[in-house]
Image (cartoon, rainbow, N blue to C red):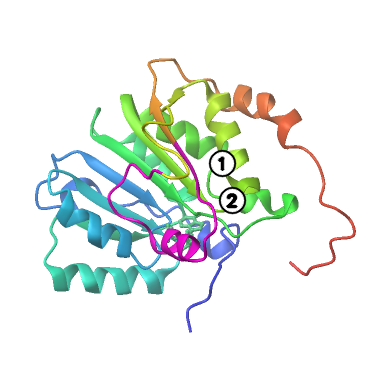
């Protein structure tokens, strides 16, 4: 049975394994890159890759069994502009993003990434300040970061972080909104949420030409917003 969640802070997921360079991943490594963080079983990218052959698509996922199953499907479908890799986005992505050729990263998607609702588990959430800065540094002006969640309390801190960086401009409601996904394929989680008649929160950001703050400055800016404690009456186990 595949475990539903892993703790990204556990020692086994903290190993600094370098991710392979684009030349080892794709038939044409010069294509613009779409990075999907938390790609799970991969069905979103397995549908996107044939629809957008002008890009390479890379899914990064912390659950190894899901990566293996997604890679099996990719090979079966003969998709040479798609790869799935095992990794912890916070540990393995920042250095790899820093090595990408300038201008190659076109789109980063982060969709329904977290089960970590409690404030005391916020360090387990995917979009941490260092990762956001690494994404922003790798995205050229005009390139996109797309966020989705069904939990408002989880997308709110992601939006606060992106906006606190000062490095992105939010696209208007004509480009993205609760009733409008700018991408042509729904993720698995998105499909489940919509089938249940529940709302999906979405934000599309474009990288501006603003310089990036330091990590320390960004964290200091966020501190008053993100500090706090869970309700002590919340007795649910970790
Ligand atoms: C709720 S699922 C959503 C999957 C897919 N994006 C969708 O919308 O259907 C979140 C995925 O993110 C993965 N994930 C969580 N933290 C991660 C991390 N630090 N690095 C890589 N993947 C992570 C989880 O293992 C899980 O497969």
In the image, is residue 30 part of the stretch drawn in magenta?
no
Give SS at disc 2.
loop
Specify the farthest residue to the right. Answer: 233
Specify the quadrant of the image occupied by residue 187. Answer: bottom left
- Up the image or down, 115 lies above or below 171; here it is below
- In this rendering, position of residue 153 left or right of residue 212: right
Question: Residue at (62%, 46%) from the top-left corner?
Answer: 152
Q: Residue at x 43, y 45 (%)?
A: 179
> Can residue 121 be seen by looking at this rendering?
yes
Count how many numbered circles sit on residues in the image.
2
Q: Does the residue tagged 2 have its C-beta within 8 Å of any atom of ligand 1?
A: yes
Question: What residue occupies the far top of the structure in this picture?
Answer: 210
Q: Position of residue 98 (x, y in %)?
A: 35, 34
Q: Where is residue 214, by image quadrant?
A: top right
Q: Which residue is mark 2?
A: 125
Residue pointed to by mark 1: 128
Report helix, strand or loop for mark 1.
loop
- Looking at the image, which is closer to me, 78 or 96? 78
Q: Where does the C terminus fall, quadrant-wise?
A: bottom right
Whether residue 125 sits left or right of residue 57 in the image: it is: right
Contact between marks 2 and 1 (CB within 8 A): the answer is: yes
Q: Residues within 10 Å of mark 2 (few under 14, many from 20)?
A: many
Of the pair 77 and 47, the residue shown nearer to us: 47
Which residues are drawn in magenta?
180-203
Give the numbered dot on residue 114.
none
């Amino acid at each position: 049975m595949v475990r539903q969640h892993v703790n990204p802070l556990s020692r086994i997921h903290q190993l600094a394994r370098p991710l392979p360079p684009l030349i080892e991943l794709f038939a044409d490594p010069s294509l613009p890159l779409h990075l999907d963080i938390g790609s799970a079983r991969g069905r979103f990218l397995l549908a996107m890759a044939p629809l957008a052959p002008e890009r390479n698509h890379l899914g990064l996922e912390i659950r190894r069994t899901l990566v293996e199953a997604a890679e099996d499907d990719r090979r079966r479908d003969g998709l040479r502009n798609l790869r799935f890799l095992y990794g912890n986005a916070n540990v393995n992505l920042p250095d790899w993003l820093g090595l990408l050729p300038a201008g190659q990263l076109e789109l980063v998607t982060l969709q329904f990434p977290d089960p970590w609702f409690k404030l005391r588990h916020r360090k387990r959430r995917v979009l941490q300040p260092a990762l956001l800065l690494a994404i922003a540094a790798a995205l050229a002006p005009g390139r996109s970061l797309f966020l989705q969640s069904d939990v408002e309390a989880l997308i709110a801190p992601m939006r606060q972080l992106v906006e606190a960086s000062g490095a992105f401009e939010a696209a208007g409601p004509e480009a993205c909104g609760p009733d409008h996904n700018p991408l042509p394929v729904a993720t698995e989680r998105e499909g489940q949420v919509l089938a249940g008649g529940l709302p999906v929160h979405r934000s599309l950001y474009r990288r501006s030409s603003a310089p990036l703050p330091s990590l320390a400055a960004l964290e200091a800016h966020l501190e008053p917003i993100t500090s706090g404690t869970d309700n002590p009456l919340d007795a649910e186990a970790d």
